[in-house]
Every structure is written in C-alpha cells, then in structure tokens.
Amino acid sequence: MWVLPERRRYKTFACKCIWFFLLVVVCWVLPAAKLGFASGEEISAEEAGKIVQASIDYYRGKASTSTVTMTIHRSDWERAMTIKGWTRGQKESLFTILAPAKDRGNATLKKGREMWTFNPKVNRTIKIPPSMMSQSWMGSDFSNNDLAKSDSILEDYSHRLMGIDSHDGKKVYIVESKPHADAPVVWGMQRLYIREDYILLAEEFFDEDLQLVKRLTSEDIRMLGGRLFPKIWKMQKAGKTDEYTQLDYQEIAFDIDLPPGVFTLSSLKNLRR
C-alpha cells in the first residue's frame, strides 16, 4: 500500500541548496519526457489536466462492467453488499445492488449531470436534486457526488502540478484541482496522486476552507480485466481512524460492447441484464 507523502519541509541551510536544485531538475525533466512534455519546460495547467484526463480514461475505459464488494466499517458494526456496475465514457454509469437480499434491486443511474435512484420496496424512481449530491450513498463514506464526479473533475476544475513523488519505482504526479468560480461543485479543492502509468493511487477532498474532509486510497495493484488495476479502494473521513468504506473488485472488464438501452430509467429498474 502506498502511503501519502508528508508535507515537505523547506530546506534553509545554504549548503543544501545545490542538492535541492539538482533534485528539482531530475524530478521535473524525467517525467516530462515520459508524458511527452518537452525537457526543461514547466508543466502547464493544460498538461496537468491531460494527466487527470488520462487517469480517468484508464480506470473507466471506453466502457466497463464490474462486480464489487462494498464493506462499510464502523467502530461497533460492519456490513457488506455486492454491487454490479456499468460505465460508458465519463458521463454514464449504472450501479445495482445484488446482495444482501434486503438491499437487492436498489440502483443508481447517472447520465451527464443528472442522477436517479430506484427503490424496489416502494417501486419508485427518484431524481436526485443538486442539494442531495453531497449526501451519503447507501450509508457509505461515498457520496452521490462521488459517483457522478468523473466528468466534473475535468469540466469544473482547473489543474496544476504541485510536485512529484514515487511509488514502486514509478513517478507519482501530485495534481491540485480547484473549481472554477461559477462551478456547481461540492469540494473547494481536490488533490490527486496519479502514477506515471495513470493509475490513481489516492484522491483527497477538501471543503471550501481547504480543510481535508476525506481521502480515497487504492492498493493491491494487480492484473484485472487485462490491465493493472487497484483491487482495493478505501474511502475514509479525516480523523476517523476506525471508520471507512472499502471497495473490493471481484471482477472487471474494460472496453466492452454494451447493449443499447443500458443507461435508461427502464434499465434502472431491471435486474435481468
């Protein structure tokens, strides 16, 4: 598991300045060449945005389907559910709960900036208003907004490269994303840790006062669906050491052909897919 780097301290002794300068040169020039940036050039906001775009394209693919075990852990209880998911591009996704029986059939559909949920117990479809986007999804540490955010991070935020770290011998790009002034978003800032092969290692979410609210981390990177992919994802609120929600991918397939009508309100209610 990759541990998020601590905030770097400024070096104040003059004797270390030369070494610090050389380190900066190495950290900026080598990864720039890896991503196709010209040597010696400062990575622009546009290029930082391309890193974020590439990461999202990598973990979603053109289309995907997956089966995930989601475990909600609290200090005095724990429960798990099995979720089937479908995605297409960055704007369409569908999630349906398969187990346990009491939750089976609950589903969420996202198309563009619109989201709906279906509750089979009352046979009712509800459109989620913007005021509910920050609310918990199925009692987990993931919000409705987290399920819908893939295109928002690209369209509503500007990006800049803060620094470079390392993980398993690979460069890790630390990208700070701040919303545009008029963007209809929940977070005041997001910080992403993206490996040079575009695997998202971590994502931090900050409120409007730029205080850390929660952190998403990934681990157990292995071959899944024909590509390296983190099997485990964990969302944890800041300061809650014994509370988290963990996603364990049982299977995933990328760049598949999905039949017409998957991302529809009719499909939202139908488990026989």
Image (spheres, helix red, strand yellow):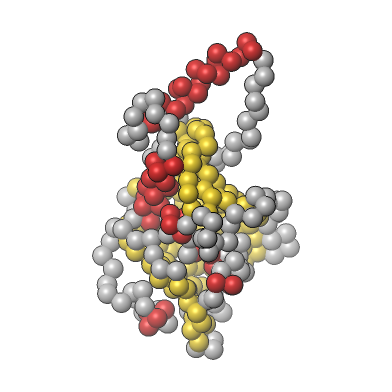
- Vertical position of residue 114 compared to residue 189: above or below: below
Closest to the observer: 123 or 28?
Answer: 28
**Quarter the C terminus occupies:** bottom left
Residue at image point 42% right, 38% down? 44
Q: Is residue 154 visible?
A: yes
Is 113 displayed left or right of 143 in the figure? left
In the displayed orientation, state which residue is furthest to the top.
15
Q: Quadrant of the N terminus?
A: top right
Query: Does 202 appear above or below 73?
Result: above
Tell me what residue is drawn at x 66 percent, y 28 percent. Answer: 9
Horizontal and vertical percent position of residue 132? 58, 72
Question: In the figure, is residue 119 to the left or right of 209?
Answer: left
Q: Residue furthest right?
A: 76
Taking the spot 38% from the left edge, 60% from the top edge, the residue there is 90
Residue 218 shows in the view = no
Q: Residue 67 in the image: state x and y as whole percent.
A: 43, 63
Image location of residue 156, percent across then percent down: 47, 57
The part of the image, by quadrant, that contains residue 51 is top left
Q: Nearer the viewer, residue 58 or 225?
A: 58
Q: Give me the residue at 32% from left, 34% from top.
A: 36
Residue that extends furthest to the front in the rendered view of this protein: 181
Q: Classify 52 as above or below 164.
A: below
Q: Going by the image, does 176 lie left or right of 155? A: right
Total marks shown come to 0
Rendered location of residue 222, percent (x, y): 42, 45
